[in-house]
Image (cartoon, grey):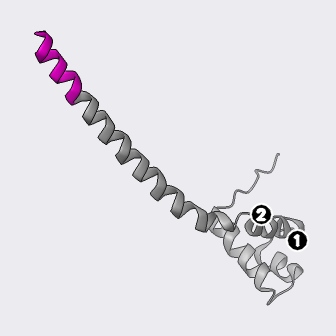
Amino acid sequence: MKKERRKFSAGFKAKVAIEAIKEQQTIQELAVKYELHPTQINTWKREFLANAEQVFAGEKKEEKDDSKEKELYSKIGELQIQVDFLKKVLGK
């Protein structure tokens, strides 16, 4: 009988990675505590540290996209007014 792979949530992975970063317990102790392989904990820790900058970069990017979206909708409105005006002038 084949054993099914365990799937971990992002929250659980972050929790384990943060505990590993704090270094209050060894990786081996964390592995026993959470029933994981030490290599898995080190992998999650490495990924967490590598992607930590995205937490702060994401906020600024959303604001920039939002302002760009407003600008484009404004331009669409202006062009629609011009089209309506030209239709009236040409009698269509």
The kind of residue tagged 1 is Pro
Label 1: how many Cα within 10 Å (few below 14, some 14–19, many 20+): some
Asked whether residue 83 is drawn in magenta, I would say yes
Q: Main secondary structure of the magenta part?
A: helix
Which callout, 2 or 1, points to the residue nearer the camera? 2
| Disc 2 to disc 1: CB gap under 8 Å | no
Query: Of helix, strand and loop, which one carries label 1?
Result: helix
Asked whether residue 1 is drawn in magenta, I would say no
On screen, residue 54 versus residue 36, left or right, reads left
User: Which stretch did the figure color magenta?
Assistant: 81-92
Q: Quadrant of the C terminus?
A: top left
Horizontal and vertical percent position of residue 88: 11, 17
| Residue under the point 40% across and 52% down | 67
Q: Tell which of 27 and 79 is nearer to you.
A: 79
Q: Residue furthest bottom?
A: 24
Q: Quadrant of residue 49?
A: bottom right
Q: Tell which of 15 and 62 is nearer to you.
A: 62
Q: Tell which of 4 and 77 is nearer to you.
A: 77
The residue that mark 2 highlights is 47
Label 2: how many Cα within 10 Å (few below 14, some 14–19, many 20+): some
The kind of residue tagged 2 is Glu
On screen, residue 76 versus residue 40, left or right, reads left
Q: Quadrant of residue 31?
A: bottom right
The residue that mark 1 highlights is 38
